[in-house]
Image: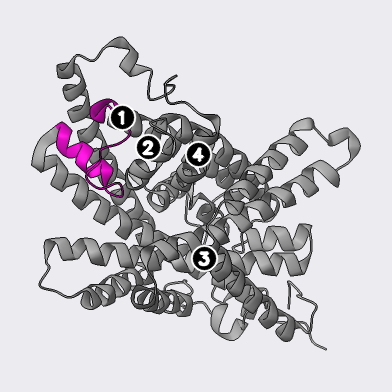
Amino acid sequence: MQPADPLVVSTAPALRRTLGLWDLVFYGIVLIQPVAPMGIYGVVSVEARGHVVTTILIGMCAMLLTAVSYGRMASAYPSAGSAFTYVGEELHPALGYATGWSMLMDYVLNPAICTIWCSKAAMNFVPEIPYSAWVVFFALLFIAMNLRGIETSARTNQVLAIGMSVVVVIFLVAATRYVLAAQLPPGAFIRPFYDPETFSVSSVLTGASIASLTYIGFDGISTLSEEVENPRRNVLLATVYTCLFIGVLAAVEVYAAQLIWGNWTGFPDVDTAFVHVAGKAGGPALFALINATLLIANVGSGAGAHLGAARLLYGMGRSNALPPRFFAAIDPRRNIPRNNVILVGLLAMAGGFALSYQLGAEMLNFGAFIAFMGVNIAALVRYGVRCERGARRLRDILLPLVGFIFCFYLWWSLRMPAKIAGSAWLVAGLIYGAIRTRGRFTMLP
């Protein structure tokens, strides 16, 4: 047999390494959103009895542990498959397939729920246009944004991250002016962290399980490993930097909000509590600005998740977990997985018509936490079990183990409808994988 012509191999379409460290950080920030805690502020405030800052910080510590596991596994396997690859290679191909399938639900549902939220928010501005038309519009918008290629998407991420950060600064300036004018007693500045009259360990931990959703999406950074300059360094740093930046910023935002509102109840609407806090601090103009910013943020998050989903499908297709002829195809002109970009957009459109926002979000968490648990265990096995005894360190065992336990608690706390729907998706995927691979769940062709 004649060896393959190297010129043929070298001219095949492939992903290009064009992203630097700060491209990844901007991508992660937009995917998570600098305004992420604003949407869950009211719910967490009620559940934690006003200790929103404490729950955000607890969540940050837990997600940082998982972020380290993601970064370390990305340095060992700089592949576009992300958790699918890590778990399959370190534990078992069947577990990798289950993780990838659950993660696929996570990534596909993110642009779907963003389509739902954006469509409803847009109706507040232009109610004459029906919901169905907005669903089609935003799904097509996400497709168009990601068909332009990775470098254009990176620039878009930077603009969105900077814009949202400016709005956050405007809110914090208004909050500072309000708090200074209110002349609060010294004790008020401590209560967002600890209020002896309402503090309860169980309520704070319950709030933290919800507040940790602020960080969902950081794992999308690792799906771009094959398009990153020096991935062994930059993916780990970008994942940790993103979680740290979002955690600190989120803590500052909710701390300011708690000082402004002064209580953990009495919101006109719990789901949009932060908007009412902004209105109290800055009047109707800030109320409208935060509303608009949350709409833009969801566009950025949806487009970013769309990008991650397309590349996850590419990784699964290239590994033969999905039909490679369709899912592993790369557009030769743009060097992007065009088929996957279009498919994810169509699924987001279908989700906009078929799902409620609440069920879609809960199902997204089901898939995300399974992936987080899988990556923590994979890191534990690789660096804490299989490595040579002399090279093994306590942190190689402790960090991923604690990360796994926390993620398991979050997964276990999901409501039953999400568990049923997520389990149905997972079982369907395992059946498909077993049939396709004849029970072997092979990771590679």
- Residue under numbered circle 1: 258
What segment is highlighted magenta in the picture?
258-281
- Residue under numbered circle 4: 208
> Foreground residue, 26 or 352?
352
> Foreground residue, 18 or 35?
35
Sequence-first disc among 2 and 4: 2
Q: CA distance from mark 1 to mark 2?
A: 9 Å
For marks 3 and 1, give the one nearer the viewer: 3
For marks 2 and 4, give the one nearer the viewer: 2
Tally of marks: 4
For marks 3 and 4, give the one nearer the viewer: 3
Sort mark 4 into few (<14), some (14-19) or many (20+) by Cα contacts within 10 Å.
Answer: many
Left or right, residue 410 beside residue 147: right
Q: What secondary structure is marked by label 3?
A: helix
Q: CA distance from mark 3 to mark 4?
A: 21 Å
Sequence-first disc among 3 and 2: 2
Amino acid marked by disc 2: Ser
Vertical arrangement, residue 353 with respect to residue 95, above or below: below
In the rendered structure, are the residues bearing label 3 and label 1 in contact, judged by CB atoms less than 8 Å apart?
no
Q: x and y percent of residue 147 in the render?
A: 37, 72
- Residue under numbered circle 2: 45
Q: CA distance from mark 2 to mark 4?
A: 10 Å
